[in-house]
Image: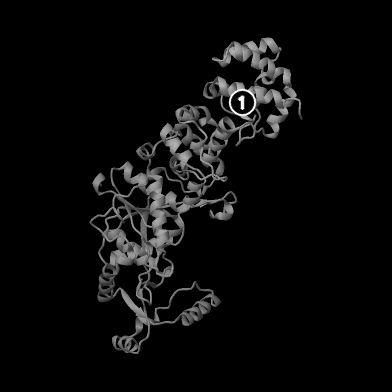
Amino acid sequence: MNSTSFRTRFAPSPTGLLHLGNVRTALFNFLLARSRGGVFLLRIEDTDAMRGHERYEHALQEDLRWLGLAWDEGPQAGGTHGPYLQSQRGHVYAQYFALLLERGFAYRCFCTEHELEIERRSQLAAGRPPRYSGRCRLLTKDQVQERLAAGSSATLRFHVGTSAVVSFDDRARGRQLFRTEDIGDFVIRRSDGTPSFFFSNAIDDAIMGVTLVVRGEDHLTNTPRQILILQALNLPLPEYAHIALVVGADGSPLSKRTGSRSVQELREGGFLPLAINNYLARLGHTYDDNSFRPLDGLANTFSVDRLHRAPAHYDETQLLHWQKEAVLHAAEDELWQWMCAAAMPDGGRIEHLVPADLTGQFIQTVRENVMTPLDAYVWAGNLFAGSAYDDEAADVIDRAGKPFFRFALDCLRDDASDFKSFSGTLEVVTGTRGRSLFMPLRAALTGAVYDAKSRKVWPHGPALERLWSLLGPARIKRRLEEAARFAGTG
């Protein structure tokens, strides 16, 4: 198979916001397409009118774009296999329904839900698996026409047959075998005329030229049904790779209860797209090199042969690790836009705090101590907006005492240009060194002595040398004077 014929797809149903489990499926398909120079297709499976919501359709497209997962074919991108919303493809499905009826692979079923429920209960009571008996398959053409003329509603069922085996090689799970007698005749068109998932999903994969279907293992038992449909219609079969599901720490399916968040929530929480992509690309897939990568770097060595069979456990700590890496690797202008775009709890704006000529220097100073835009906003407030001290900083300043800060002001008058020279002089004058020297200075300059995320006491926080250069002599002098006034008042 050459690269130009390699095609993957992401085919979500717009019934809710995009969560980590389904966006991982989108990412895997995107990376596989990019790794092979192929096509990544987006198809919206919105045939269930009661569940489909236009707002979710727009939201999931916005989330994919934000993550950088641009589709080559699909809504708004166009392509030769459209339309890409299944709700607009009824005429396509009607042709194939007619073909299956004509070839004897499908029949109308007039059984009511009540009748089907009684049948299921009887089978279970007899110790048999619940399978449709196929009784409507025995109706004559005249009986079918009579019921239709009387206004009876009917589903369309696919006739599976018995004593056969459906087999396929799953690219993630190996050889798979299913006995047709365990499947039973299944519905391919609902009584309201809309296609079932089994049908529309399989038809569209075939006629849109999808060559590899990567999806969750919860779809594994759907695959033999879809293979039977495609074989009956002489349509091409894609390859399949059913990936292990993402689970919470307790092994249960990932949900809000087990820590799952939507992409929208992660975006609003300050996560960067590449943090999410780097984390999810490793959630059920292995790289030899575990370094942070841009999207094309993630794609270069992404392989279906490296997908895991075991469940992938969601780990918030790992997501935060990749967030930290994303912040460290982001360009200055990207980080500044990220900081400025976020809404702050108090309605403030970071660009109103950081002087315009110091934005680059501010970013380089605090980059290693920032995980979210709120962290950056807090640092900006600490450094440029005032001299409020947190409890730990207040205690450190108070214990250092007024003489320490008066000596510091004296040393500042002698040499304010270089922190190393200043601190060396202050060490000689005061006889203090190490933590006793640097912690009071950090508390005075920043109003804090700990990192907001780790809450580990000094030396965590921006390097004092960088803070010294960022603040400049006038701000430093003012901060030391404020600390001298505060010391001894606790």
Q: Quadrant of residue 231?
A: bottom left
What residue do we see at 35% from left, 62% from top?
201
Tell me residue 318's x, y (percent). 53, 40
Q: Is residue 27 visible?
A: yes
Q: Is residue 439 visible?
A: no
What residue do we see at 41% from left, 71% from top?
184
Mark 1 lies on residue: 445
| Amino acid at dot 1 | Leu
Q: Residue furthest left?
A: 80
Tell me residue 225's x, y (percent). 37, 65
Tell which of 240 and 461 is nearer to you.
461
- Indicate left or right for 246 with 293 as reference: right
Where is 5 relative to 430, above or below? Answer: below
The quadrant of the rendering that contains the C terminus is top right
Tell which of 435 and 111 is nearer to you.
435
Where is 141 relative to 312, above or below? Answer: below
Tell which of 73 and 138 is nearer to you.
73
Tell me residue 359's x, y (percent). 47, 30
What residue do we see at 50% from left, 47% from top?
268
Q: Quadrant of residue 198?
A: bottom left
- Indicate left or right for 369 with 18 as reference: right
Tell me residue 188's x, y (percent). 36, 71
